[in-house]
Image (cartoon, helix red, strand yellow):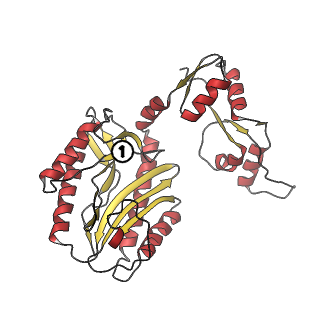
Amino acid sequence: MDKSVEPALITGISDADVVSTSETRVKDVRFYGTFYIEHRGRKLHPAEEKLLTNISGKTYKTAIQALTEALQERGLDKRRVGVDSDVLYHSLVRQMPENNILNSRSLARLIRAVKTDEEVQKLEKAAEITEKAIFKSVEILREGITVKEVAETVKAYVYQHDAQPVAMVIGSHETAAFPNASPNMHRLEKGDIVRYDIGIIYQNYYADLGRTAFIGEPSAELKSTYRALHKGLEAEKQAIRPGVRASHLFDVAVETTRINGLTHYRRHHCGHGIGLELYDVPVIRPEDQTVVEEGMVLNIETPYYELGFGGIIIEDTLVVKSDGVEMLSKTSNDAIIV
């Protein structure tokens, strides 16, 4: 590919405000579709002026028209075009028969798996906000407070730090073993588990972290279960280095957890890449033969759910370095006891 070819951004006119407030470095932005934002001569703020400039230019009827013209202007209208979208791929095959349209989603995701320094910084900040939001809510954990109040504390912190919550899973009491538990009005009691699995977006990048708290001293069985899961996670972390396969990391996590006392432990995956997508390449599972590379950002996790017993999750974020890993989530992943 000729790196001198200028990139173009094509998006719906209804998203012009998103483009105007974004950090995109793309200068050639093309809008399509119909959307109405009025301006009748009033004085504008700088952000409004930028939006007005964007919506006052040429607008295409369809995205395909905008793409076709952009390719023609770059002399690429009869060249191979790789598409990072299954839906768009089929549409382009029909509407651009002169091009050799390739479904390049798998390739694009693999390329995106290795992050730039700027991306790592954003992912680190996203992880930091998520961790601090969780521990802000830990400060109010006590008997009598509702799970919903705990969730609202997490959300408030996330919003206050220029991010958006996208997954607010907090399991406790009767939902402690529910993987997708929604915060409810249960009032915390002594002996309750509070299982956090929190996802946010910060400047378009995801965070996904898990911590587990106990109201009062946990039982011996809970302690031993937590210890086994923690050992599995730490072994998985120690095994990460460039050149290993994702499937090997899965085996290490599961086998170590079993060896340390949770002999029946089963999982479908023990982590995943993270970035512009919540589940990026690779997914740490038996079937994924992706080779780990320096610069990949991974979430590692060893969750456990058992009806009648409860649920525990430990989930951290790290970046792969030449000699191991650097943690992007910084807080302790030990059991939280309040």
Query: Which one is in front, 120 or 296?
Result: 296
Q: Residue furthest right?
A: 40
30 left or right of 3?
right
Above or below, 251 against 310 in this view is above
Above or below, 299 against 74 in this view is below
Quadrant hosting residue 223: bottom left
**In the rendered image, which residue does mark 1 sit on?**
272
Q: Residue furthest bottom?
A: 144
Type of the residue with mark 1: His
Task: Name the secondary structure under disc 1.
Answer: strand
Q: Please tell me which residue is depicted at 34% across the width and 55% down the height of the picture.
A: 329
299 left or right of 88?
left
Q: Please tell me which residue is depicted at 82% across the width and 58% down the height of the picture.
A: 43
Above or below, 84 against 219 in this view is above
Q: Please tell me which residue is depicted at 43% across the width and 49% down the height of the picture.
A: 123
The image shows residue 320 at horizontal and vertical percentages of: 32, 41
Q: Please tell me which residue is depicted at 70% across the width and 22% down the height of the picture.
A: 73
